Image (spheres, helix red, strand yellow):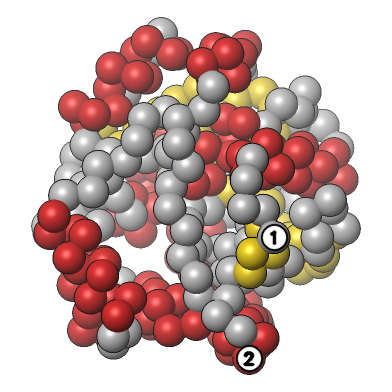
Amino acid sequence: MASAYVNTASGEVIRLWCTEQLQNWRTTHRRWTIATSAGPTRMVALGHAHKSGPVVVVVPGTNMNTAACLPFLAELATRYRVIAVDIPGQPGLSASQRPRRDRMTWYARWLDEVLAQTVPETAVLLGHSLGGAIALAATSQRVVGRVLIAPAGLVRLAVPPRLLAATLAWLAAPSPERTDRLLQLMTAPTHAADPHLVEWMTLVARYCRTTLAPAPLAPELLDSCRSVPCVVATGAHDIFLPRGRLEPAVRDRFGTELRVLADCGHLALDDNPTAVIELLDDLTGRL
């Protein structure tokens, strides 16, 4: 097993930041921790407690967590019952350890356990980036739909030279300025990088061990995902998963068309949360 943090003190810094963000959040929510085979997992529930229909379970991307997604979650909760999770082995308030091998099998089992403990009826999985791959790998019968935003697990991510250079600089000498330059590559050209994310990702570079995106999932696993409705989208300016890279895989695996989110980069949940929620509306309207 490997830790998400450089050392014990680094983990404390990250947990303190996340805890403070949630404590200062003005959106009504409930926080608790559950036990799973992947270790303690922090849960946050918000939205209309008595609203009918499936619960939306938000599974974030690499280096992201609930505390880094508060603006999006607040908007999502105006329409849906929401459960947000911190992924074990990623920076946040869940367990710090992650396996060195068979990571997606491990994460799939973890998410199935999360759903069994927290979703009494049905769920729609909203997965972004790494979270998209985990959502695809999950096999729980509670899942009645998936909305995947720039998901890993279908094709290998593109890493153009300018992105690689910005990432190496960000990791070698973390600073808000270098973080901003990196995030700007993941953001639509018309948007500035969110200051909240700049602060968070600077901490990630200083105190965390980041991970690479997972390899594409096994074809037979992806084929099994056809059993429930699935919407897959990417930003028109996504540097990791541009339309031309992702579209053939979506068509071949799911028999559906890739949705392209205008004025969005890889960080579509921040660039245009309303457009992401409209994808959920489209899917849940068909259930």
Above or below for 224 versus 179: above
Instruction: Residue 148: tell me if it is visible.
Output: no
**Residue in the image at 58% along x and 13% along y:** 220
| Type of the residue with mark 1 | Met
Above or below for 134 versus 269: above
- Circle 1 — which element? loop
Instruction: Residue 205: tell me if it is visible.
Output: yes
**Residue in the image at 17% along x and 65% along y:** 165
Above or below for 46 versus 82: below
> Which quadrant of the view contains residue 13?
bottom right
Side of 195 where 253 appears, left or right = right
The residue pinned by badge 1 equals 1
> Which quadrant of the view contains residue 123?
top right
Foreground of the two, 274 or 120: 120
| Type of the residue with mark 2 | Ala
Residue count near mark 2 (Cα–Cα under 10 Å), binned few <14, some 14–19, many ≥20:
few
The residue pinned by badge 2 equals 9
